[in-house]
Amino acid sequence: MIVAIVAVITFVLIHLAPGDPFSGVMDNPNVSEAVRQTLRAQYGFDRPLPEQFVKYVSALAHGELGWSFSHERPVREVLATALPNTLLLMAVALVGSFTLGILIALVQVARRGSATDHALSGISLLFISMPDFWLALLTLLAFAYWLPLFPVGGTIDPVMHEYKGFVGRIVDRLWHLALPALTLTALASAAVARYQRAALLDVLPADYIRTARLKGLSEREILRRHALRNALLPIITMIGLSFPALLTGTFFVEKIFSWQGMGYAVVNAIASRDYQLVMGGVIIGSIMVTLGSLLADLLYALADPRLRGQ
Amino acid sequence: MAAMKYAGLLCAIVAFGCVGTESSSTKSSGGTLAISVGGDPDVLIPSLVQSTVGVEITDMIFDRLADIGDSINILNDKGFTPRLADRWTWAADSLSIAFHLNPKAKWHDGVPVRSNDVRFTIASTKDSTLGSPTASVITNIDSVSTPDSATAVYWFHARSPQQFYDAVYQLPIMPEHVWKGIPPASWRASEAAKNPVGSGQYRFVRWIPGAAVELVADTTNYRGAPKLSRLIWSIASDFQTALTRLLSGETDFIEQLRPENIAEVAKHPELRTKQNHALQYAFAQFNLRDPANNARPHPIFGNRELRRALTMATDRVKLVRSVYDTLALPALGPTVRAYQTTDPNLTQIPFDLPRARQILDSLGWRITSSDGMRARNGRPLEFTLSVPNSSKLRVQMAVLLQEQLRQAGVKVDVEQINYPVLLEKERKRAFDADIGTWSTQPSPGAVRGSWGTGGSRATSGNNYGSYENPVFDSYVDSAISAFDPAKRKALFTKAYETIIQDAPAIWLAEPIQTVAYHSRLQLAAMRPDAWWAHIPEWWIPEDKRIPRDNTPPSATPPAQSAGQKTP
């Protein structure tokens, strides 16, 4: 239902935007209106909007996402190529950010009230407040230009990739993944760290923690074995809920790093008024977000035995 | 005086562009040229391609019957060099030209190039179901006949000074055996479009959308093997990323620097820059029709004297210098200096602010308020100047123009909008004024569509400002049909002077293309219409090659490689 509502709203909004799918490409004094009309007819853009909508929904019901005129390929194919790149980036960022965020929170709680705790809180706040595109640009400038450790963008080295062996190709891919993944990880880990710190501080006054202390366990053991386990529940929820934010962030980061994922494809499609690709991207995105929420519910139930019977 | 100065600069640029940079090093073949571009090609089909990147690539893959010379002469066949046609014969009445194909010419799949390929190329382009943008510029070609497999005869409707140019320049030849079985409306989506088979000096290897297009030298080409073994268009998401790839050494060449990039490029000793005249001009265009009702003249710009006053109030030299530094010259009119038909000393409306103020006063537009802005009968002298927000240069020009016109008491509201939205407004004639650019072809005749009455009255024609003057139309028509170069130039001069004095636009800038490239590359001359035309003659000395230069050309069969996924 959510996906259907998103699809309808997106269809209406993108067609309300002024401009023509062929305006950018056909900005040529030699292109006649007749040619523009022929092209509109070829792609069905000359039909009334309700007719286009019915046709689109009908195709969608048959699992067809339409045709991308800017890629000259079915939208299904474009997204099938792009989606693995986005999932790879998101997965690395998700694992990286939660690992890093939890570690930072543990350090902060272990040294709560100290200068380290305050400094890490400040840094987390800074990264949370930072726009993702801005950090992406800064990272690009710092590590690809001023200190050229990583490539400027792309998913592979377009010049040399095809000439590398299998391992070389994997390394090339990871080398290109580093900066976009680092950007997303830095942004998301800051939020995770703050949530995790708060969750840990919530459980520390609990009776079972006091009991553990009375048993003579070290503070490190208490944090790792008792506090962290119980403080993970809100973070598990956050995994699912961070999907929308991560996906949105991915869109901008992919665009800036020319990472050929779904965000890159959709942002370019918006610029070129490639209606059906935008629709396809939004639909897949909304499915991913919905699945993310479902995953959060399932993980929560898995982690908390009290919820399994409900 | 100013004209003399710019003429001098022009000569220096042309001279620089024509001087070869060859050294005494050996010109052995090999090396890779990685070109930074800010987007994918639209399509790799010669009769459909629109984007500059797409044209660059298709021009390497496909050959024409003959190629235009570096002087971009379009009169008759002067300066044209043989390509697929090794010679041609004019009919006595000039209504047909027989092209004799080079018997050694072959498509990249090994099939010989035959006259039926030529006939097919023209016939398919004229097919309305294809929707080719080239169709409108080959209307003088009636048909192509093929008396034998090695001879293609072009038949024309009428004699024209540029009929040879129309026949050979507009379209590279396409292989009939590849395209014949595909309905024209399905060409863009076809597998053939993803694996183009041509006859040029480079053959297609792969196109990884959003990443790269790769070509390799066709070592058995009928014109001989090119010097560079491999060409790669490295596709970035935008211009800035494309430039950063050049600066970081990932690529070797970028086709257009912006003024703000020059200092950054200068910090890299391994990079060089080179200037080349481009066929482009920028202008602030007035809508002469009322945006609310196109049947009526515009309440402000409908008046010729007022438009002249606005032009007079604009210091174009200062504006161009401020925005472009040395990367542009003040535009002469709706033309470019690279045309042989352009007189660089065209009479201009001079910058004269006091006179502009006088004219506005005399027209009844007087300063009535304390802010120094003019009004007439309670209506302020105010208009909206639209610019695409994606073009930093155009936005800068708009802001400077706003300030210059403010000094004459004219209020300009600068509106930065999305480019497709601006184009939509232009097509609907729903704008006051905007800053536009036209990229033209070697033929100056395109001015008829963009500034002539036909382009104004046709539904969504390209004369967005609706400038109409039968005198201008007449001069342009006469110039286009004139065979004598001197007479042609004189007629174009009269046409340009007519439109300049009518001031349907303020002619702002004529950009000079500035390319940046790695110093190991040895470039040849650059053509104003196509900097890439001589890429097959570019080379890299063996002692300057870097690892990517020595990579063996890919052996991946094109059919398996287009758009392939990589680990």
Image: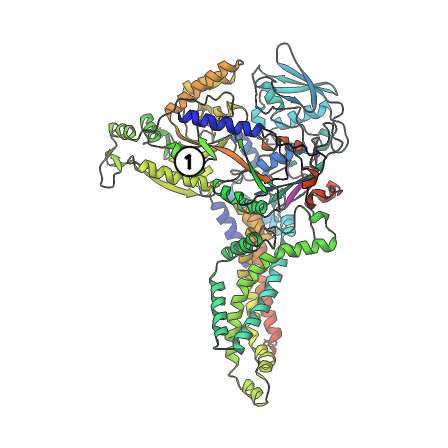
- Locate residue B366 relative to residue B72 in the image: left or right: left
**Vertical comparison of B351 with B33: above or below:** above
Residue B216: x, y in percent?
Answer: 71, 38
Q: Which residue is mark 1?
A: B321
Task: Return the residue nearer the eye: A62 or A26.
Answer: A26
Which residues make up the magenta segment?
A: B188-214
Residue B505: x, y in percent?
Answer: 40, 30
Residue at 45 percent of width and 37 percent of height: B324
Q: Amino acid at mark 1?
A: Arg
The quadrant of the rendering that contains the C terminus of chain A is: bottom right
- Locate residue B343 relative to residue B358 in the image: left or right: right
Residue lying furthest top: B92
Task: Return the residue nearer the eye: B301 or B262.
Answer: B262
Residue B291: x, y in percent?
Answer: 37, 34
Residue B54 within the magenta-colored segment of the rendering: no
Residue at 65 percent of width and 12 percent of height: B91
Colour pattern:
rainbow
**Vertical comparison of B492 with B211: above or below:** above
The quadrant of the rendering that contains the N terminus of chain A is: bottom right
Q: Residues within 10 Å of mark 1 (few under 14, many from 20)?
A: some
User: In what element is the residue under mark 1?
Assistant: helix
